[in-house]
Amino acid sequence: MQTFSLQVQQEFYWGTVLSVGYAGSLGRHLLGIQELNAAAPGSGVAGLPFFGLGRTASTLFYDDALTDNYNSLQVGMSKRFSHGMSFLAAYTWSKALGYTSANNLLFNPANPRADYGPLDYDRQHVFTFIHLLEIPWGMHGNHMIETLPGGWQLNGIFTWATGTPLTITTDPLMCASPGNTVFANLNSGVNPVLASGNAYLNPLAFSAPFGGTPGTLGRGAIFGPGYRNYDMSLFKNFRVHDRFNLQLRGEAYNLTNTPRFLNPVTNINSPDFGQTVTTINGAFGRQVNVALRVIF
């Protein structure tokens, strides 16, 4: 694996720094697993290469001839804490391409080049914004008018990212090609993405290939649902004594109560095709915590 990067920074007023950079990597001699006993489209079981030897079971070949690559533009802006405010913003525009999915198995044994496409972890756009806003007045107030308006601190983390690639498939029996992973066809003139409730993909946009023909879609041809989240906290500090500080804390995770689904079912022969039926493990709806803290 070879990695390379380049970054340029420029500092502006009030401690604000803008950085623009490029980061990339190139992988060589990566593991690939190829199914040797796979039939050509339309040939059926009799088309299995080892059928004449009486073998219809899977026969795998392991090799290290595959490659992958990652390229990204990374832009960041940060401000050191001053004038009651600090923030950090980061944006990445990237592309990760390769031949295999997480299990290293080639989908199209007869034509590995057809498997070249976005890798499973590819997210084209990722944006993160972290902020801290503090009202400096009233921190050391001696009466109610000075104390109530001041001592407030607002913190937050916002994250937005586009989805990861989807590979739309159909059962190999649909085109009589056992041993293969068969891509589906994309029907022209129909929007493939519904993004309505749990229905993410439009079943009318996809169809099984005709017998003897491969599907028109490739690996990772469509991207799944994106991700966005905002965590916020609001603090109020009361100066009780020179050595004591009372802090009222309110924290909200997933403030907008946005559901976070896994990628939808991608086999067009499944009754749940196109449905986002499972949420991300550990992802919950809005959670609110309130606490009182004494600092000394």
Image (spheres, rainbow, N blue to C red):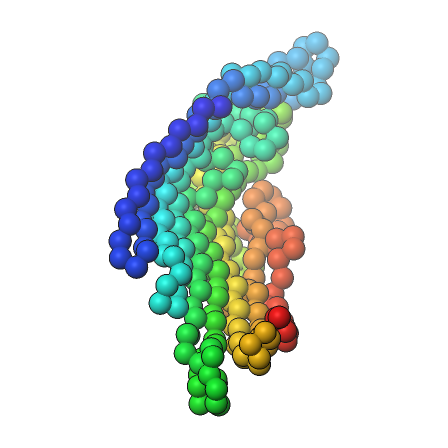
- Quarter that holds the C terminus: bottom right
Question: Relative to 119, is 126 above or below?
Answer: below
293 w.r.t. 34: above or below = below
Q: Residue at x 51, y 67 (%)?
A: 232
- Asked whether, in this view, residue 88 is left or right of residue 278, the answer is left
Estimate the x, y position of residue 289 in percent, counting from the top left: 63, 71
Q: Determine the residue positioned at 54% across, 79% down.
A: 239
Seen from this angle, which residue lies furthest bottom?
144
- Residue name at image x 36 percent, y 49 percent: 76
Is residue 149 or residue 4 the one in the foreground?
149
Between residues 251 and 265, which one lies in front from this camera angle?
251
Image coordinates of residue 225 in percent, x first then y, are 50, 52
Look at the image and tell me whether residue 40 can be seen: no
Q: Please tell me how many numbered marks the rendered image carries.
A: 0
Residue 175 location, quadrant = top right
Q: Which residue is drawn at 33% across and 45% down?
A: 19
Residue 30: percent from left, percent from top: 54, 21
Between 77 and 121, the one lying in front of the other is 77
Above or below 216: residue 226 = below
Residue 59, x across and y down, in percent: 67, 18
Displayed quadrant of residue 48: top right
Q: Quadrant of residue 278?
A: bottom right
